[in-house]
Amino acid sequence: MAKGAVAKEKVEKKIAEAFGADFIGNVDKKIYVWANDGGERVQIAISLTCPKTPVATSGSTTIGDYDFTESITLTEKDLETAIPVEKVEISEEEKNNLADLLAKFGL
C-alpha cells in the first residue's frame, strides 16, 4: 500500500461527511463535490497527495502523525508561512521578446 493511503481514506470520509449530499464521490483518484459559485452549482475536483516533505505551520518545529479527529483553523499568516512565494520579475529581454511576438502575430 502506498504511503498515505490510509490517511487519504480518512480525509475522503471527512470530506464526505462535511459535504453531505453535495459529496459526489471518488473518480480517477479525485474527490468530486458540488459547490455554490455565486448562484450556480459547479463541481469541484479535489486531488489528495501525501507529500514527501511535509510543510510546517507557524509555531511548529516538528511534524508528527496527523490526527484528523481534531479541528484545525489556519489563519492567513499560517498560509503565508506554509507556502513560500517568490516574486517573479520580468526582465527587459523577456518584455522585448513578448512585444516582438505580439507584433509578429498582429496581436
Image (cartoon, rainbow, N blue to C red):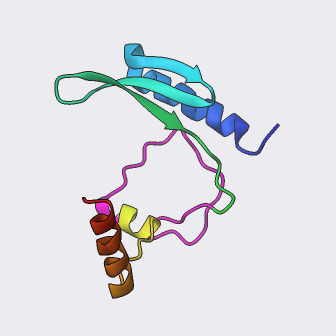
Q: Is residue 72 magenta?
A: yes
Residue located 38% across and 18% down the image: 22
Residue 59 visible in rendering: yes
Residue at (32%, 58%) from the top-left corner? 75
Q: Looking at the image, is 15 positioned above or below residue 96? A: above
> Height in image: 44 above or below 104?
above
Query: Which is more toward the observer, 22 or 106?
Result: 106
Extreme-top residue of the structure: 21
Judge by depth and name the residue closer to the eye, 19 or 36.
36
Going by the picture, which residue comes out furthest to the bottom?
A: 92
Compared to 18, does 104 lie above or below? Answer: below
| Secondary structure mainly formed by the magenta segment | loop
Residue 88 seen in the figure: no
Residue at the left extreme, as displayed: 39
**Magenta segment boundaries in residue numbering:** 54-77
Tell me residue 18's x, y (percent).
41, 26
Q: Image check: 60 left or right of 101?
A: right
- Residue 92 place in picture, x, y as percent: 33, 86
Where does residue 30 sit, x and y in percent of width and height?
56, 31
- In which quadrant will I find the C terminus? bottom left
Query: What residue lies at 63% left-to-right and 36% top-to-bottom?
Result: 8
Viewer-closest of 72 and 3? 3
Say whether residue 23 is left or right of residue 48. Answer: left
Extreme-right residue of the structure: 1
- Splitting the image into 4 quarters, where does residue 93 fall? bottom left
Q: Quadrant of the image for the N terminus?
A: top right
Q: Is residue 42 magenta?
A: no
Measuring from the top left, give residue 33's x and y in whole percent: 42, 24
In this rendering, the count of numbered labels is 0
71 or 5, which is in the foreground?
5
Q: Which residue is pictured at 30% across the width and 61% down the height? A: 76
